[in-house]
Image (cartoon, helix red, strand yellow):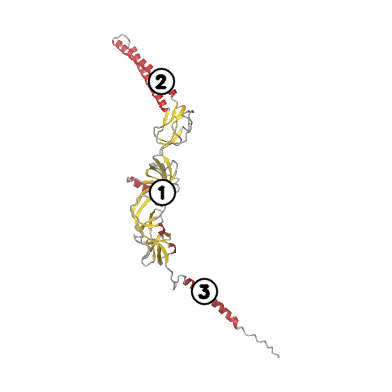
Amino acid sequence: MAQTLSEPSPPASPRRGRRPVRFVLLLLLIALAVLVWYRWPAGGVRGGGQPPQPVGVTAVVTGSMPIVMKGLGTVTSLASITVRTQINGQLLSLGFKEGQMVRKGDVLAQIDPRPYQAALAQAEGQLARDQALQAQARSDLLRYQTLARQDSISRQQVDDQAFLVSQYAGAVAVDQGQIAADKLNIAYCRITAPVDGRVGLRQVDPGNYVQTSDTNGIVSLTQLTPISVIFSLPEDDLPQIMKRLGSGATLPVSAYDRADVTKLAEGTLHAVDNLISTTTGTVNLRADFPNADGALFPNQFVNAHLLVDTLKNALLVPNAAVQIGVPGSYVYVVNADSTVSVAKVTTGPTDGIDTVITKGLTAGQRVVTDGADRLSEGAKVVVVAGPGAVAGKPAVAPAKPAAATAPPSGPASPVHAKGNRQGG
């Protein structure tokens, strides 16, 4: 039986077995290079440690913090008057220039008084006639009374004469009232300013016949000194305000422009409205301003800053130092070994620059104000900027003065004590 012989297979090439090994080695080298890249940063820190983070710090200081409540307001005149005629007649002249400042008692308009002067003369003549008749009736009454005592005339005739005297007395009183009315009408012909203020544009020209039924009047007059601002605050602020007013305190109010940057005038709180708006949940307040320089103008839109109180010897930190996170409000405190610790704090009012810390810090501690976003508990830091630096760096800034009792002007003015709390 024939045997079938198979051909032997060729031997495997030694290069095929080496390719996977080389590929694995290449991957290991790449992984090692990446590991060295991340574990050996450009700064030259060896052993896998993180370099100290550069931060800016400042010291916790004590000072005064004004509690200021802000509200939108409108400048409102204490007297806005439409000057109208109280009698009918021809307008002879105007005693003002449009936009002029006038004083109380200055003549604003003159109406033709001649018709009323004629009526006055007629009433005075009627009075003289009735007074003469009254005198004659009294003389007759005296004679009748003498004759009655002599039983020369009847008692009825005496009584009739007494009634006639009374009638003439009434006629004299009517005449006197008519004279007073005519004199008043003549006085109304000369229209004067009831208050100090600024007149507007005239509504009628001389020569026209003016009447009491004219709706536009002759001119408008607005009082400018003093002037008031009506502004609104949330109802939650009302208890603190009423408590201060109840203690007899005078609360200062500053008026700022529409952009809330430039201070226009300073005044005092005058009154609080007697009800809270159920629609907006706010209450209206009125503040009075001397306005000697005319900085406030009626219907002008302003921002009112009400200084309710001032916290003395409060712990202050810059707003940038306070962070908001899962634990609430916290700051990073720089320790003596150049590490940082997280300190949970309770915040109070803020003025837009500094924040009051009511709990969690003590005066003199250093807190991070710049670079806090790169920190964590126990992180190493190096102080490179800001007051409160370590040796060789800028020194701790002096404590904030405690004498400030009023809000500063300009953009750094205090803001609403509640609307700007940073947690806690």
Element at label 2 = helix
Q: First in sequence, mark 3 or 1: give its number.
A: 3
Query: Residue 125's spot in the image, x, y percent?
Result: 39, 18
Task: In the displayed orientation, state which residue is furthest to the top.
Answer: 152
Give the residue at mark 1. 70
Q: Nearer the viewer, residue 214 or 134?
A: 214
Which quadrant of the view contains residue 265?
A: top left
Task: In the displayed orientation, state which residue is furthest to the bottom.
Answer: 1
The answer for how far apart the CA atoms under marks 3 and 1 are is: 61 Å
Query: Residue 217's spot in the image, x, y percent?
Result: 46, 32
The answer for how far apart the CA atoms under marks 1 and 2 are is: 63 Å
Are dots 1 and 2 in contact, CB under 8 Å? Answer: no
How packed mark 1 is, by other alpha carbons closer than 10 Å (few <14, some 14-19, many 20 or more), is: many
Q: Is residue 186 above or below residue 2?
A: above
Give the residue at mark 3. 31
- Residue at the image position 48 percent from the left and 71 percent from the top: 38
Q: Amino acid at mark 2?
A: Ala
Q: Which mark is residue 313?
A: none
Q: Which mark is residue 121?
A: 2
Query: Residue 74's spot in the image, x, y percent?
Result: 43, 43
Mark 1 vs mark 2, foreground winner is 2
How packed mark 2 is, by other alpha carbons closer than 10 Å (few <14, some 14-19, many 20 or more), is: few
